[in-house]
Image: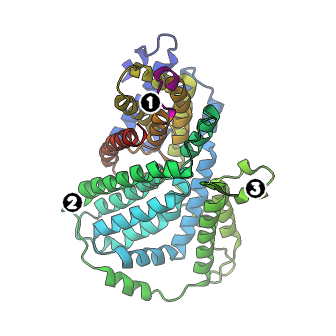
Amino acid sequence: MLFWFFIELDASNHNVSLMAGVALWMCTWWFTEAVSLAVTALVPVFILPVLGLSDSKTVAQQYSDSIIFLFIGGFMLAFAIEKWNFHKRIALKILSVVGKNPSSILSGVMLSTYLISNWISNTATTMMLFSAVFALINETKAHIKKNDHRFAAALLLGLAFSATIGGMATPVGTPPNMYFFKEYRQAFPDNNDLNFLKWSSIGYPISFVFLICTFLVLNFYFLRKKVSLEIGKKYFADAYKQLGGFSWEEKWVAFLFGLCIVLWFTRADIDIGPYRFSGWNHLFKVPKFIDDSFVAVLAALLLFLIPSKKNRGESLLVWEDAKKLRYDIILMFGSGFALAYGFEISGLSNWLAASLVVLKGVSPLLIILGICVVVTIISEFASNIASIQLAIPVMIALQKDLNVHPLLLMMPATFAASLGFMLPVATAANTIVFGTRQIKMGDMLRVGLVLDILGILIITLMCYVYLS
């Protein structure tokens, strides 16, 4: 593996090869699980300063991105939901509707996640539904005839992947889409061919076809002739009735849960065609300082302040409850940001993006395919917003050389930035569900590779048909 550090990818910048070696090293440890995943997550803090790519202080700062506090606050809410059994109520209600068999439960989870993720961030969607999905797993575990671990993996990956896919459908579904809109309008101010409806007319077909393919892959890989449910929907409906009314604590947890959903939905401005809905973040002095992590931390603070009637002298959540927080997953989150930072400062991301110049003079279909492949590779290691920030300037420059419509290059790149299903660090949604220890690394790698390939092909063909 060390030989990669001495391969010269870019004669003018040896740092490109060094960073490629670091990425290969970490991937090898993640894929083989040679050491704990959290141990692998510490590699950037040690190796980037040693290689002269960055100082320790700056690398360490990557492990405290605001999205990590979205994770912390969201899991505090999840702990409260679990503590007061609100997750069981949600799970039994869902199962009473879709609990016919494992496949129908998987489809219900994926479709509801997809529809919510059309409108709010993928991470917030995953956090919102995580407790309910985990409760679904626990409620059905005793009634799965065999291979219940495969059912758990299917549901959790279905949650994470459909949250990512749902973000592709609308301009507001995920940050790369919004970034693309801004850059396109700045670079091509005379073009009036892009609006909410235009994006959605392409985004919904691509994302929905991809969602169906993802369901089929997960169902085939995890559930085909291996998992069966001994009971039906009536069992879950009866179990829900036995829960009785909401307790004081459940009401407060349900209220805070609902409040988070509303605040996540309405935080930022939403543009729908000619209509613009102003977000509540404008109530603050600097609106851009308020993000989804603010909502999660606010909910966590309230949980520690609102008193419990059942446990006198305690609040809905006490610090003993919070000790269940998975710090290894926080490290994995941070390592993803550190890797992305390393790709940027070393020039490796630019080297990957610049490799697209070899597409000059070839068929538009192959150009789109090449763009999707390169951006997908980047997105496996960098966040989706970092991937598109690197790709869009290259697409604008490439458009001038190729003399094709900019949307033919920029839209496929934006869609491909949301791909990244192989690695736990590829997206925050992946990291959240992988942290449950219900998913084997090998399973995620194999399923993720298939989905990356399918995503590339779907985006390539449908963008070519819609935009050519």
Q: For mark 2, give the secondary structure.
A: loop
Residue 401 in the magenta stretch? The answer is yes
Let me know if residue 40 appears in the view. Answer: no
Start-end of magenta stretch: 399-406
What residue would you read off at disc 3?
282
Q: Residues within 10 Å of mark 1 (few under 14, many from 20)?
A: some
Q: Main secondary structure of the magenta part?
A: helix
The amino acid type, in three-letter code, at marker 1 is: Ala
Query: Which of the 4 image quadrants contains residue 295?
Result: bottom right
Closer to viewer: mark 1 or mark 3: 3
Residue 194 in the magenta stretch? The answer is no
Q: Which mark is residue 60?
A: none
The amino acid type, in three-letter code, at marker 2 is: Arg
The amino acid type, in three-letter code, at marker 3 is: His
**Quarter placement of the C terminus:** top left
Q: Are marks 1 and 3 in contact (CB under 8 Å)?
A: no
Query: Which of the 4 image quadrants contains residue 274?
Result: bottom right
Above or below residue 350? Residue 296 is below
What residue would you read off at disc 2?
224
Q: For mark 1, give the secondary structure.
A: helix
In the rendered image, residue 247, in percent from the top left (x then y), is placed at: 58, 84
Q: Residues within 10 Å of mark 3 (few under 14, many from 20)?
A: some
Report the residue at 59% width, 69% height from top.
257
Q: On the picture, is 211 further left or further right than 192? A: left
Q: For mark 3, give the secondary structure.
A: helix
In the rendered image, residue 11, in percent from the top left (x then y), is placed at: 47, 10
Q: Earlier in the sequence, mark 2 or mark 3?
A: 2
Q: CA distance from mark 2 to mark 3?
A: 49 Å
What residue would you read off at disc 1?
23
In the rendered image, residue 151, in percent from the top left (x then y), is placed at: 31, 62
In the rendered image, residue 48, in percent from the top left (x then y), is placed at: 55, 26
